[in-house]
Amino acid sequence: MEPSKSLRTATTRVVGVVSVVVVLVLLSANGAESRKQWVFDYFEYSAINCRAHSASLTDFGGVGDGITSNTKAFQAAIDHLSQFASDGGSQLFVPPGRWLTGSFNLTSHFTLYIHKDAVLLASQDENEWPVIDPLPSYGRGRDTQGGRYISLIFGTNLTDVVVTGDNGTIDGQGALWWTKFHKGELKYTRPYLIEIMYSDNVQISSLTLLDSPSWNVHPVYSSNVLIQGLTITAPVTSPNTDGINPDSCTNTRIEDCYIVSGDDCIAVKSGWDEYGIAFGMPTKQLVIRRLTCISPFSATIALGSEMSGGIEDVRAEDILAINTESGVRIKTAVGRGGYVKGIYVRSMTMKTMKWAFWMTGNYGSHADKNYDPNALPVIQGINYRDMVAENVTMAARLEGISGYPFTGICISNVTIGLAKMAKKVPWTCTDIAGISSGVVPQPCDLLPDQGPEKVVACNFPTDSLPIDTVEVQSCSYWGKHL
């Protein structure tokens, strides 16, 4: 099979998908008429890079009946297309259908495009999920000691990789995994839907992700990561179905995402206890914009609890939280080490919340008993401004570490409307230090009001991060499938 050349265009946005159906009429040997239908696909999509070579999953024996395993077809297609990495790159088209598959590995200079009427169904057969080593910054799996099942869509040591579609669907069929987790029957840590490791120039966009076995999107040890236009949903009682977890990554942009989750909608991480300290790779230069989150038992944006490599320079704005436990939460503990500093959040709207703000220095949950009790996390330079909340049970719960307070907290121009059954004391603060200005209800004494003239405090950075300069171009695909 010789892949066809893709078309290139000069426009900058997605302009649509067109399918042309051509019916070829063939005559059978006995003269009776039979018909074979080809579908010719042309579409345009936005990506960080376009590709010179293309193929369809059906070219490699893919069958979209929801029953036949396509694991070998996916891997055969990607292995074949990898030869074009140095010749303009390649793209694999997943046409309409229900494509049952186990895990498969991506390649560099490559685009996986999932049609809007295509569904990738994660296999229920554990034999289609190889087991890989724990992340070195974690030292063990999150669910169990030892290894972890590889993610459904996986890549490591890649350059220039795109996973996108016109809201094509990846269905993790996670209920089986959730049951095993609750019953303590897991041999290894549950798989994620998409994990990209040790990679540069990554785009994950315009997809619908359903019912992940655990975390949905996990870029880790990577740089220049663009995540756009994802719809992520799972039952709000499903265990650990975090939406997007940037982990020890530099220069990441997350925008225009809608997440309904059983855990944090976005959890920023950088390693666990002594393993994260030794690995020493922070998450920094992170932008989060235009996020909508529903998570009744977790946070809209969480920082930690695995933050032992450090988290710094996080900028979040235009955030909507609905029926969510907390707006912004910082989770850490003695033994974590590391730091969370230079955090900026503005223009956030919260509706029906337990807490608007939550910080805790006693989160616990250690990787093992070998953590260093002298490894104390540094939490400083936390800035929240220009926010409105309604129907909130408690404005804030801010709890640092005794003798080692969280410092440099700044809250400005924030109005929190309390629920009818709200706590009598809207703020609880221990082992913290900072200021406030123009905040309702009045914060605790550890955040003294600086007066209306200081309402401009907690300034959001005015400079741009490198990821803000990354632009997408309009790419296209032309091919056929049966």
Image (cartoon, rainbow, N blue to C red):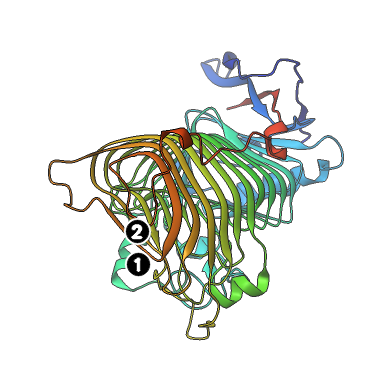
Instruction: Determine the residue positioned at 60% across, 68% down.
Output: 135
Check residue 239 in the rendering and tell me which mark sits there, or answer none: 2
**At numbered mark 1, what does the secondary structure look like: helix, strand or loop?**
helix
In the orientation shown, which residue stands out farthest toward the left? 421
Residue 330: image x %, image y %?
Answer: 44, 57
Residue 396: image x %, image y %?
Answer: 32, 51
Q: Quadrant of residue 26?
A: top right
- Asked whether disc 1 touches disc 2, contact meaning CB atoms under 8 Å apart, the reply is yes
Instruction: Determine the residue positioned at 34% across, 55% down.
Output: 445
- Between discs 1 and 2, the one toward the N terminus: 1
Nearest to viewer (mark 1 / mark 2) = 2
Q: Nearer the viewer, residue 206 or 377?
A: 377
Q: Is residue 376 above or below residue 249?
A: below
Q: Quadrant of residue 181?
A: bottom left
Q: Nearer the viewer, residue 300 or 223?
A: 300
Q: Is residue 376 above or below residue 54?
A: below
Task: Tell me the amino acid under the disc marked 1.
Answer: Phe
Question: Where does label 1 land, which residue?
Answer: 181
Tally the numbered discs.
2
Task: Please indicate, yes or no, whether residue 145 appears anywhere in the rendered image.
Answer: yes
Task: Tell me the amino acid under the disc marked 2.
Answer: Pro
Q: Quadrant of residue 171?
A: top left
Instruction: Determine the residue positioned at 72% across, 32% down.
Output: 469
Residue 207: image x %, image y %?
Answer: 51, 35
Q: Is residue 478 above or below residue 435?
A: above
**At numbered mark 2, what does the secondary structure look like: helix, strand or loop?**
loop
Q: Nearer the viewer, residue 288 or 143?
A: 288
Q: Is residue 177 above or below residue 145?
A: above
Instruction: Determine the residue positioned at 67% across, 68% down.
Output: 280
Q: Quadrant of the N terminus?
A: top right
